[in-house]
Amino acid sequence: KEFVSQKKNLKSDLRKCTAFVKKVKSGGSWSMVSSSSSSLISGGGGGTGTTKECAFVKDIKTLNLSRYVEEIASAILEPSKQMKMNDLKSVVQLCMEMHERYEEIASAILEP
């Protein structure tokens, strides 16, 4: 995959990666933000070319999170998280983006 070849160019900064994991655990950035990039989850912009994507997507695309996959999966599944129906698209997109880059997240989510 393209991601595997570019993995060495991703940031492995411990501070940024742990901050990302903390954001997922807190659920504070589940909101969708406008983006001009292509995404499977569109914001229904009426053909304007803009989509909405989870605020986490930029971090997923720039950070090497391979050491944190299981921790992120357990944070997504954490029962104490008060998730709203509006957050569902963001959670699904987070899972999709993570699975696109880290296939092992599927087994971590399905077999906690």
Image (tube, rainbow, N blue to C red):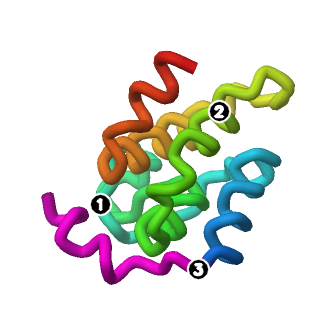
Numbered range of the magenta stretch: 1-13
Compared with 90, 33 (above or below) is below
| In this rendering, the label closer to the viewer, 1 or 3 | 3
Question: Quick one: SS at disc 1?
Answer: loop
| In this rendering, the label closer to the viewer, 2 or 1 | 2
Q: Which mark is residue 38?
A: 1
Magenta stretch, main secondary structure class = helix
Question: Quick one: SS at disc 2?
Answer: helix
The reply, left or right, for residue 101 in relation to residue 57 is: left
Q: Earlier in the sequence, mark 1 or mark 3?
A: 3
The reply, left or right, for residue 78 in relation to residue 10 is: right
Quadrant assignment for the N terminus:
bottom left
Q: Earlier in the sequence, mark 2 or mark 3?
A: 3
Instruction: Give the farthest residue toward the left.
Output: 1
| Distance CA(mark 1)–CA(mark 3) | 27 Å
- Asked if disc 1 and disc 3 are in contact, CB closer than 8 Å, the reply is no
Q: Is residue 64 magenta?
A: no
The residue lying at 42 percent from left, 54 percent from top is: 45
Depth check, front residue: 23 or 108: 108
The reply, left or right, for residue 55 in relation to residue 104 is: right
Q: Earlier in the sequence, mark 2 or mark 1?
A: 1
Residue that carries the numbered disc 2 in the rendered image: 74
Q: Amino acid at mark 2?
A: Ser
Quadrant assignment for the C terminus:
top right
Question: Quick one: SS at disc 3?
Answer: loop
Residue that carries the numbered disc 3 in the rendered image: 13
- Asked if disc 2 and disc 3 are in contact, CB closer than 8 Å, the reply is no
Q: Amino acid at mark 3?
A: Asp
